[in-house]
Image: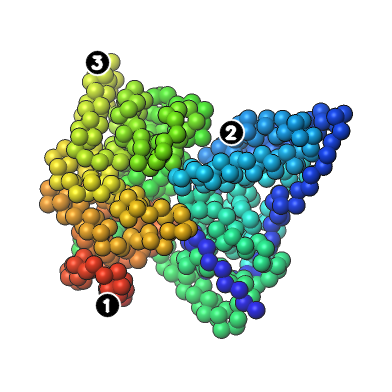
Amino acid sequence: MSIVLHGVPIGGGVAIGRAHLLSQSMDDVVHLALEDSEIAAEQQRFDSAVRDTRKQLELLWGSIPENAPAELGAFLSLHIMLLSDVTISRDPRDLIESQRCNAEWALKLQCDTLVEQFDAIEEDYLRERKHDVLQVVERIFKNLAGHSTDLQFVEDMDEDAILVAHDLSPADMVYFKDSSVAAFVTDVGGATSHTAILGRSLDLPSVIALHHARELIREDELIVVDGQQGVLIINPEESVLAEYRRRQRNWIEARRKLSSIRKTDAITQDGTAIELLANIELPQDAANVLESGAVGVGLFRSEFLFLGRDSLPSEDEQFAAYREVAEATRGAPVTVRTMDLGADKNPRWLNHGAAENPALGLTGVRLCLAEPLMFRAQLRALLRATVYGKIRILFPMINGLGELKQALAQLEYAKKELREENIPFADKVEVGAMIEIPSAALVVGSFVKYVDFLSIGTNDLIQYTLAVDRNDDSVSHLYDPVHPAVLKLISHTIKTATKAGVQVSVCGEMAGDERLTRLLLGMGLRRFSMHPANLLAVKQNVLNSDLDTLAPQVARILRSEDPDRIADLLTQLNAGPDA
């Protein structure tokens, strides 16, 4: 009998193959009562497992394949750092003594406590860091049990093998990168989890958050993974299997064709040039930007330089990172978003207390303005890097002209300091504001006199406009990029900026969604910034589009406020004669 499961699609097309089940986690841990004389030895056994785990992670960190996603090193570093946290390395030792229990049971008790704490957090990014803790804890558990990860044998598996796991960690991905596996699926994970980020980078068919796949699938069972629709099919019927084999062939052929346009300029059929740029998180990502077909970096999320460490990075450290990106992109534009910390991204060195509603609290540029010395250190580092490339500075989470003017004043102060210290920086530095709050979109006309460019962050704009957390399963179906209110805000921003002669781009997930390329083109967008893995599919749609044909179709979409009508019109738009 066929079983169909639905999860979060990570992309990568369609895979058909035999299931390879990875070992279960700590579900079968038993409680053993210890005598007083046994406690010290049990604590030593736990300490030894932690040390072994650290050695394994450090060894993996030092043997990351050259072609591995750049994010992999950062995530492994985070896991190594988590091992030093007292909640993982010391509290289970205390539980062994206080509960007089075995190390596995103490580790499970502590893990359950940490899970409860993380589940109580409202913000999706921080809540999903729970999975990083679980992955580290499970690796300690495996060392306690005396067996290492069975992913070490992945490279010997058949090419049609599909990994089925409760979870996969960044450390597991080291084995994954050079293997011949066809796909992977997991029970847990969210759209912003590290597993999801790495899955997109690997460009393998993958689906996460399936909940019960590991329980329902048997070893060597035939399964289908649809990484575009987020569907997993166990024991597909022949008719279903034939359809997915057809889809798989089409996907493979489409990938082959896309690779041929990597160096083709993104120009529409009517001769309009479109700029396609890449989003990056770490300096190492920059090396592959130009190879991906991008013409520059449209969004460098600089806050990743501040996360996963015990202290604030110095100005010199930041300068070195920005210089690395500037030099790697060889004169191409690099838009650096100033640190978008707070809310769901709180480094442990940043102590502002727990906000009742973090998403509406001290975050983005608000936090920067509340910490002017920290903010100015970053601005100074960015300005110093402009000597080595075309660095552009982007302020996040601006809610109105007042905040924008304050941020610009801090930038001028940083320039003044550098001049007084005779430290060089470029005479002309382009500055922009992110439009990701509805209030900013509505008053964007007041921004255009003060900025060189605007960048629409659709992820937050959608969530704030619709009051929907897209990672909350209970309301995620309401997260709608083509909701008429969202489209009106985006259209208004593009039109206002274009009329004022100010460059505007979209850097959120909508930019990399090939189903929305023609819609955004018809709204007047000429600059898209996205994950490099999405770039060629978007370019293909650009090459096959005629703007004169798109404009009246998109105008009809923007006039409609009926979701069903918009969906129908969007289907027609993407199925036009020039599609």
Element at label 2? helix
Residue furthest bottom in the image: 239
> Distance between the Cα atoms at labels 1 and 2?
54 Å
Q: Which mark, by number, is residue 216?
A: none
Residue found at the far top of this picture: 421
State the residue position of label 2.
81
* Amino acid type, mark 1: Pro
The secondary structure type at the circle numbered 3 is helix
Q: Which-is-in-front pick, marks 1 and 2?
A: 2
Q: Which residue is drawn at 44% across and 30% down?
A: 353
Which residue is labeled 1 in the image? 577
Pointer 1 with pointer 2, Cβ within 8 A: no
Place of residue 63 in the rendered image (x, y in percent of width and height, measured from the top left): 62, 41
Q: Image check: 98 left or right of 35?
A: left
Residue found 70% across the figure and 34% down from its top? 92
Q: Which amino acid does label 3 sit on?
A: Glu
